[in-house]
């Protein structure tokens, strides 16, 4: 089926007519069948044209006992004159009360056609590519999503309902994986497959509709993906090792994410490779590092995941260093050494500065002015102390 990339939307008529069934309100369905019967003259003739087995079955469709195959709806439109067809199409679109796929699958009630590819749909896409998937099981499209965060699970369900309409979403807790799992009704899986195609293991890919989208759409996509697959490392106490990492089984997805990040002027690191030997699964990963890229990520993308959102706040706060006016750093060094003898590295940490030339220069000036002194310890490192204090 054709997805209308130009308008970023799916209409009822884009759906595969051999897999989709609709239900309309009674007034609308009776009017449509009345027009069709008037044209072919008898109900028996209409039943034959629509390949309905009996008049009794025809009445079941007319009185809303059955969902009507979309294929049958299109045959009725072929019977009706072209002048009336536009009005009837409008009547159908405004009066659909439910839509479902083959078998006893759960329907969407009050479906929201046309289905727009907006920021919420982009988030759904990110989650499907992250901790979800779409695959075809014996002709039924299965769309699923898993996460340990109940907040993200509920947000995903809300986005599904906001985009597609009211539907019953099956949710359970998988003890083996210690995560919640969602399985969407097959009609939702079918629609998602029209847009995203198969998204399962090595078939996962970033759809063109994302790659060609504006920054708002791409930002929502990345946020969902990082909520699922991202990790924030606060690093060591001296500020080293801070990073925002991402890991995925599919290298093509990793390459696509890095390409999108560059559009936000965020520089991704080199792609690494690791193996989970418990499952013999290969993962590809990369990290974002550096204050300016962290700030851009927080502003342009960020997280919905509460723990990761809090971590990036802490990370950025760790860059908020004290500002020293003239003479203040020297006074701070004297204050520190009045409490304990310290080496250059420890002094730098307490000053919340990198161990660099500026601090060495301050220490040298204090030594020249006979305020502090230093001597090497047994490890060969200089230890500084106040001259007025007894050396430890």
Image: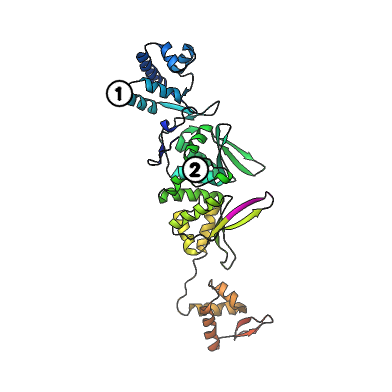
Label 1, secondary structure: give it.
Answer: helix
Quadrant showing the C terminus: bottom right
Residue drawn at the location 57% of the way across and 72% of the way down: 349
Q: Position of residue 224 (x, y in %)?
A: 51, 48
CA–CA distance between discs 1 and 2?
39 Å
Between 80 and 150, the one nearer to me in the picture: 80
Q: Residue furthest left?
A: 83
- List the residue tagged with mark 1: 83
As displayed, is residue 370 above or below residue 278?
A: below
Which residue is more in the foreground, 385 or 27?
27
Q: Where in the figure is residue 1, as x and y percent of width and height?
A: 45, 34
- Residue at image point 56% right, 72% down: 350
Give the residue at mark 2. Answer: 124
Q: Is residue 271 magenta?
A: no
Residue at x-position 58% and y-position 32% = 138
Identify the element where label 2 is drawn.
helix
Q: Is residue 55 visible?
A: yes
Looking at the rendering, the stretch of residues picked out in magenta corresponds to: 278-284
């Amino acid at each position: 089926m054709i997805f209308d990339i130009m308008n970023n939307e799916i209409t009822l008529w884009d759906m595969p007519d051999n897999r989709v069934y609709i239900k309309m309100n009674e007034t609308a369905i009776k009017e449509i069948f009345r027009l069709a019967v008037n044209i072919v003259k008898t109900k028996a003739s209409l039943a034959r044209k629509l390949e309905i087995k009996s008049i009794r079955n025809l009445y079941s469709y007319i009185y809303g006992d059955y969902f009507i195959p979309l294929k049958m709806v299109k045959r009725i439109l072929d019977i009706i004159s072209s002048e009336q067809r536009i009005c009837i199409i409008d009547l159908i679109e405004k009066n659909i009360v439910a839509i479902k796929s083959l078998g006893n699958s759960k329907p969407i009630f009050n479906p929201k056609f046309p289905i727009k590819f907006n920021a919420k749909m982009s988030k759904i896409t990110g989650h499907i590519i992250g901790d979800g998937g779409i695959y075809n099981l014996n002709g039924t499209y299965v769309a699923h999503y898993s996460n340990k965060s109940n907040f993200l699970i509920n947000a995903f369900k809300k986005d599904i309902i906001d985009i597609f309409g009211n539907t019953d979403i099956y949710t359970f807790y998988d003890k083996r994986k210690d995560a919640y799992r969602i399985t969407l009704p097959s009609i939702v899986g079918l629609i998602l497959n029209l847009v995203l195609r198969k998204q399962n293991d090595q078939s996962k890919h970033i759809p063109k509709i994302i790659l060609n989208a504006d920054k708002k759409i791409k930002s929502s996509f990345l946020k969902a993906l990082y909520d699922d697959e991202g990790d924030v490392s606060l690093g060591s106490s001296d500020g080293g090792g801070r990073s925002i990492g991402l890991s995925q089984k599919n290298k093509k997805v990793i390459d696509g994410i890095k390409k999108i990040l560059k559009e936000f002027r965020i520089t991704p690191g080199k792609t690494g490779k690791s193996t989970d030997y418990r499952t013999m699964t290969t993962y590809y990963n990369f990290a974002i590092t550096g204050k300016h890229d962290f700030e851009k990520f927080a502003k342009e993308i960020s997280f919905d995941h509460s723990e990761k959102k809090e971590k990036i706040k802490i990370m950025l706060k760790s860059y908020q260093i004290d500002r020293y006016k003239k003479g203040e750093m020297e006074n701070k060094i004297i204050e520190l050494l009045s409490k304990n003898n310290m080496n250059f590295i420890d002094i730098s940490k307490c000053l919340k500065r990198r161990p660099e030339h500026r601090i060495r220069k301050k220490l040298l000036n204090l030594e020249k002015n006979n305020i502090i002194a230093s001597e090497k310890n047994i490890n060969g490192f200089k230890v500084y102390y106040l001259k007025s204090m007894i050396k430890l």
